[in-house]
Image (cartoon, rainbow, N blue to C red):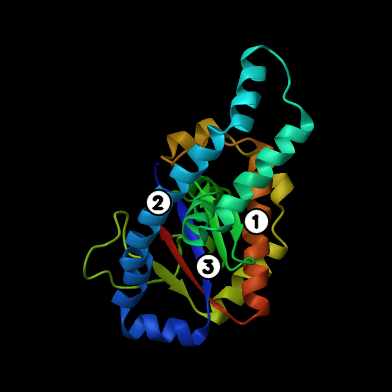
Amino acid sequence: MGMEGKLRQVSEFELASYKKNPEKFYSNLFGNHDLKSIKSLGELNARLFEVQKSPLGQKIRERALSGLQPLPEDVAEMQRQMQAVMSQHPVAQAQIEAQLPGLHKGGAELSLHKSWHCLHFLLTGKSWEPADPPLGNAIMGGAELPDRQQAMGYGPARYLTPAQVAEVASALATFPVEEKAKAFDPEFAEKQKVYSPHHDEEELVHYFGLLRDFYQGASSKANAVLLWVE
């Protein structure tokens, strides 16, 4: 799957709890809940497979193999059945959604997928070396949350305080993303050892918009932010 950048809003109270007991955060991220997710995901896949093998699914498949477009009413019914199955497995559904790029849980979580490092480079001009705040804090900044059990493969999670979050939100609000994205050079970024550097202008503007909206939402609620790569 590669290295994927994740961000999560937490209250100041939650952050204080995680700072006092970092294992609580890592346990919530990869512990028993994850085992439950794996079991539920297997059950969900089995149910979805049943829907696909149903007479309706076979009808759609046969039309496709014959070079015919599926009937709109059949597609709509298939989507309805699959959504009904998904709704019966909320744990697995949440796990699937969390892997998709974009905002989740009402904007409280953000997955930048493999675009996190390219976006950091766009914001700061830096690759792996430290970058000045507040823009340097947006994706790769913050203080480390100690990972004593070494649960994370790409280094400990980090956190930004509500005050730091507000500074990032303010800086992103005035960042000239269209200008920077137009001037972005993927080949130069690759030479600077940026991870997954080949993004076009439209992608960069899109992911920046997700990041900006995430921080604006966090700042408006006086929330802290946790950041990590998995």
Question: Which corner quadrant holds the N terminus?
Answer: top left
The residue sitting at the right extreme is 72
Identify which residue, 156 or 136, lies in the foreground: 156
- The percent position of residue 204, horizontal first and vertical second, equals 63, 44
First along the sequence among labels 3 and 1: 3
Q: Nearer the viewer, mark 3 or mark 1?
A: 1
Amino acid, disc 2: Trp
Kind of element beneath mark 2 = loop
Mark yes or no: residue 123 visible: no
Count residues near mark 3 (Cα–Cα under 10 Å), then give few for <14, some for 14-19, many for 20+: some
Callout 3 amino acid? Pro
Q: In the shown orientation, is residue 120 left or right of residue 64? A: left
Gap between marks 3 and 1, in whole Å?
Answer: 19 Å
Q: Are marks 3 and 1 in contact (CB under 8 Å)?
A: no
**Which mark is on residue 210?**
1
Q: Which residue is mark 2?
A: 128
Sequence-first disc among 1 and 2: 2
Residue at 53 percent across and 82 percent down: it is 11
Residue marked by disc 3: 133
**In the picture, residue 59 is in which quadrant?**
top right
Depth check: give the residue in front, 6 or 81.
Answer: 81
Q: Which mark is residue 14?
A: none
191 is higher (above) or lower (below) than 85: above
Residue 84: x, y in percent? 62, 52
Relative to residue 132, is residue 77 drawn left or right?
A: right
Is 65 displayed left or right of 160 in the figure? right
The alpha-carbon separation of the residues under discs 3 and 2 comes to: 14 Å
Task: Depth check: give the residue in front, 30 or 111.
Answer: 30
Disc 1 vs disc 2: Cβ atoms closer than 8 Å?
no
